[in-house]
Amino acid sequence: VPTRTGAQPGDRLYITGPVGDAGIGLILASADRHAAGPLVDAYRRPRPRLAEGALLAPLATAMMDVSDGLLIDAQRMAIASGVAITIDHIPLSSALEQVRGGSTAVQLAAARAGDDYELLFALPSAIRPPVRAIPVGHVAAGSGLVLMIDGAVMPLPDSLGWEHG
């Protein structure tokens, strides 16, 4: 089973689904305990990607779930693997875009939100994912995390996601 430690320069980085749904779902559910809809469902009934993980395990150089936020978990993978990771796409669901739009601020909030439980994984560039996956970045020699939105390098926010105390 791959861990977060094996990402290699040249790998492509993918995620099994959009980010931010559970985080916005939590906000909606906190404001109204009777709230319903796909975003609230994403928070209340997360769907771990077990089948996808089993199919990816023999191919991925690194893999982890995104439980604390895409940015912080990508940074953790970069540190553990001793590489630099660039996130160049933040996938949003149509449900999230209908509620919040797709602005840079919304993308940043979604990339920092937790509880999505999608799989973030690295594959050698010659290998295509055997599961539904969205390309979100790439791995390079070096260290650290780089965030790009709409082709522009963005300063990293002070908080990248949930940090366990």
Image: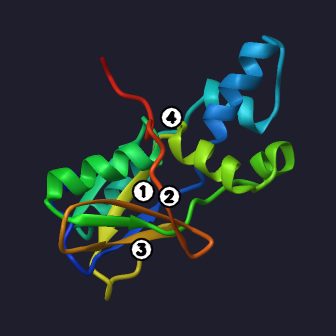
Sooner in the amino-acid sequence: mark 2 or mark 4: 2
Question: Mark 4 and mark 1: span between their CA atoms?
Answer: 19 Å
Q: Amino acid at mark 3?
A: Pro
- Amino acid carrying label 1: it is Glu
Element type where label 2 sits in the image = loop
Q: Position of residue 106 (x, y in %)?
A: 69, 48
Give the vertical position of 112 relative to 103 (above or below): above
Q: Whole-percent x and y of residue 48?
A: 46, 40
| Real-space Cα separation, disc 1 to disc 3, in angstroms | 10 Å
Q: Which mark is residue 16?
A: 2
**Residue 147, percent from left and from top:** 46, 61
Under circle 4, the secondary element is: loop
Q: Which is closer to the viewer, label 1 or label 3?
A: 3
First in sequence: mark 2 or mark 3?
2
Query: How far is mark 2 from mark 3, CA to CA?
Result: 10 Å
Q: Identify the mark nearer the N-term, 4 or 3.
A: 4
For disc 2, the neighbor class at 10 Å (few under 14, some 14 to 19, many from 20) is many
Mark earlier in primary sequence (1, 3): 1
Q: Which residue is mark 4?
A: 114
The image's mark for residue 52 is: 1
Residues marked 2 and 4 touching at CB (< 8 Å) = no
- Depth check, mark 4 against mark 3: the one in front is 4
Q: Mark 4 vs mark 1: give the one in front.
A: 4
Q: Are marks 2 and 1 in contact (CB under 8 Å)?
A: yes
Q: Given the image, on which type of amino acid does mark 4 rest?
A: Gly
Q: Position of residue 154 (x, y in %)?
A: 51, 61
Compare marks 2 and 1 and give the one earlier in the sequence.
2
Mark 3 — residue?
129
First in sequence: mark 4 vs mark 1: 1
Disc 1 element: helix
